[in-house]
Amino acid sequence: MAKLLIIGCGGVAQVAISKCCQNSDVFQEIMIASRTVSKCDAMKEKLQNKTKTVIKTAQIDADDVEALTKLIKDYAPDAVLNVALPYQDLTIMDACLAAGVDYIDTANYEPEDTDDPEWRKIYEKRCKDLGFSAYFDYSWQWAYEDKFKNAGLTALLGTGFDPGVTSVFAAYAKKHYFDEIHTIDILDCNGGDHGYPFATNFNPEINLREVSAPGSYMENGKWVEIPAMSIKREYDFDGVGKKDMYLLHHEEIEALGRNMPEVKRIRFFMTFGQSYLTHMNCLENVGMLSTTPINFNGQEIVPIQFLKALLPDPASLGPRTVGKTNIGCIFTGIKDGKERSIYIYNVCDHQECYKEVGSQAISYTTGVPAMIGSMMVVTGQWKQPGVFTTDEFDPDPYMEALNKWGLPWQVVENPVLVD
Ligand code: NDP
């Protein structure tokens, strides 16, 4: 039925590619295009005899809009799935517009060079106007609304697990369980153990930037910012047990805050072990998380990129990670005049994911929704001109697909709330 161009071939992409190949009825053909073409060829080699999906590969630098536009025009896919890095979001959106093709991604735009004076001017104004200081935000991609609308094209932003599935859970809760939602707490628990004192479960640069930034949440339509890791709670997660979790800034708060303005408070918590936090604090204190280039022995290096080269590749954690993840949302509000609270979540087992597709659960829980979001767009179920997040469409077919494609969810009434 459809042809999908997948950009990137890292941890998340490899799961999305494997899932597209399991879903050959929808994805008749895919092209894997990335910076390092040998990774794309290795994926093709691994999968081509086990699937009906026809796989092609190509080398591409997705920062090069002209070359990417040509590749899209030559291959003529129904949509482009961006599972490269958030740095490429805008160039890939530009190429999709130039080639007249729908766009899908899993993370909102942030610049690679946060010292770029032009970007910094806009960023500093946004920090002042809105009150949160994370490097990533939706304004850059929401600014493409008219361009996509006028071109009759769909851009689906952030179809990973969080953001992505968590926002679909919110739309589902709103549709089926509440007349009014008052609070949303998004809880992301990774109870997995990879045996290293310190490693990140997805791209280290993106992960450490996110986690070391100040936390923030939305209350009555306004951002409240707090020092990094300064709000801590303990929660007993189904399938995992008790874990410490910390309030972080996260992108779906921004989209849900805009699209569900009636919600009075939206927070995001993620679990971290003590070893992770101690290492991160130490690395931050010595300047290793900095994105500002320094000169070392006549060579310019960016500390966080050098650190990335030293850390284990997240794609290599699969065989050694054991335990489960539990990611979901607790909603409180009113139904038929009565107070109600529900918890919708998925539990995913690292080793089960590894057995199925050769990846740990963090890549799996992102790559499966990336395939599902792409399926929603190419089958026309979620196709509308403009730029959208996953809370803006009918959640039912997506929720059904989660059950079918490896991320079953459950709804619990009256869960323990987070204070
Ligand atoms: P990886 O670093 O493992 O993979 C990134 C891939 O993109 C690599 O194959 C890399 O190529 C390729 N790439 C980077 N720059 C370019 C470029 N200029 N042109 C072409 N290809 C390029 O990252 P992950 O797989 O961990 O993460 C992928 C995305 O998923 C990120 O945007 C991340 O933020 C997002 N994510 C979203 C989550 C969610 O729940 N919503 C959760 C986790 C991640 P090379 O092989 O040469 O390095």
Image: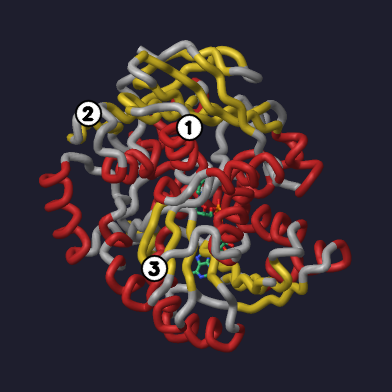
Residue 115 horizontal side relative to residue 169, left or right: left
User: Dot 3: what SS?
Assistant: loop
x and y percentages locating residue 229 in the rendered image: 34, 25
Q: CA distance from mark 2 to mark 1?
A: 24 Å
Q: Residue at x 18, y 64 (%)?
A: 117
Q: Amino acid at mark 2?
A: Glu
Residue linked to disc 3: 385
Quadrant of the image occupied by residue 340: top left
Quadrant including the C terminus: top left
Quadrant including the N terminus: bottom right
Query: Which residue of the protein is positioned furthest toward the right in this rendering?
Result: 49
Query: Which residue of the protein is positioned furthest toward the front in this rendering?
Result: 336
Quadrant of the image occupied by residue 14: bottom right
Q: CA distance from mark 3 to mark 1?
A: 26 Å
Q: Amino acid at mark 3?
A: Pro
Residue linked to disc 2: 219
Residue 413 horizontal side relative to residue 65, left or right: right
x and y percentages locating residue 51 in the rendered image: 83, 64
Mark 2, other Cα within 10 Å: few <14 / some 14–19 / many ≥20: some
Residue linked to disc 1: 176
